[in-house]
Amino acid sequence: MATTDDLTAPQRAVLQLLLKRGKSYDEIASMLKLDRGVVQSRAHEAVAALGPDKPEIGADRRNEIADYLLGQQTASGRAATREYLEDAGKGRAWARSVAGALRPLADDGLPEIPSEPDEVDEAFSALDAREARKEEVQAKSQLGTKILFGAAGLAVAVVLILALGIFSGDDGDDPKTATITRTGATTPNETPQAIAQGVLAPPASSDSQASAETAIVRYPSSNQFKLLIVAKKLATPREGSTYGIWLYTSRSDALFVGFPKSAVSEAGDLSVVADLSPDTRNYREVLITRESVEKPPRPGAIALRGRLQVATPASTGTQTAAPATTTP
């Protein structure tokens, strides 16, 4: 297995143009006065050289994964490759191997490689244990009343978020988006109740410093539900893509909430709120993903993700941290 230092100069140059400068095969071919096929072949050879000496998947699959990791596929191509990686253990293993070597060149990170099913279960078990310990520490230090967003309180955060921006969404008939309604000027003038909360973090394979806090809140008088997110240090999306928000349990059980109406600030801040209908089904996580199509059929590359935990109302003076088991 080679490293990037072992590659030829033309191979390293192509990878740097693709990953550091975000160029496409066509753009590089135009810059270097080469045929596009030559550029793509050079990239494929470079990525293959970074993988195991005896790969367990065929050349066509290796080239497909290379295009996926280098960001050179169409939206449908990315979806197909991601689906393949979700189901193929040998493909995931090869992708992870080469991704480790490519990551130092990727300033904006690489597309996510799906986790092994047992890794997902293990991660949730570890998260449960960590959240239980967090609850114990909070109870001892009398921090249980700080539901979310610090001592300033959730009500202040709601006011700030509503002032900063809302989601733009689609109220079509798609059952995976029909539960989302538009946020307007009808937000009740009352303190909401926190129903669930979470902290979002980048995937383990990412070098991103981004983070976010999220909550689902309810206005008792009108029974309105809203999803709130405050994110920091998010990278500006690449041209042709934007961030999308999902409620998520599994790849077959995900709800697309919509796209943030406001753009990420120069500092990487993003504050948004979306309406949720009372019959929104229970989901385990909130995802912030990178999307490049208007109506994504499933989550794209994950920028941030975090599990929702049940939260008791602030007025009780306590807080619990357990997996959400009831519908908001």
Image (spheres, rainbow, N blue to C red):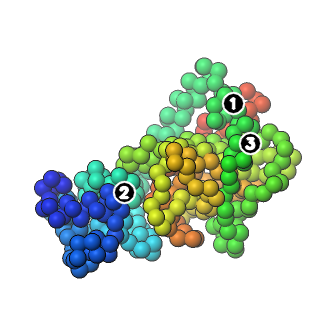
| Tags 1 and 3 touching, CB below 8 Å | no
Seen from the viewer's position, the closer of residues 162 and 27 is 27
Per the image, the residue denoted by label 1 is 152
Q: Relative to residue 220, is residue 113 drawn left or right?
A: left
> Is label 2 or label 3 in front?
3
Task: Tell me the element at label 2.
Answer: loop
Disc 1 residue crowd, few under 14, some 14–19, many 20+, Cα 10 Å: few
Rendered image quadrant of residue 67: bottom left
Q: Where is residue 41 in the image (x, y as percent from the top left)?
A: 21, 74
Disc 3 residue crowd, few under 14, some 14–19, many 20+, Cα 10 Å: few
Q: Where is residue 265 in the image (x, y as percent from the top left)?
A: 55, 49
Q: What residue type is labelled 2?
A: Leu
Tell which circle, 1 or 3, labels the residue nearer the N-terminal end.
Answer: 1
Q: Which amino acid does label 1 sit on?
A: Ala
Instruction: State the residue at coordinates (70%, 32%).
Output: 153
Rendered image quadrant of residue 230: top right
Per the image, the residue denoted by label 3 is 159
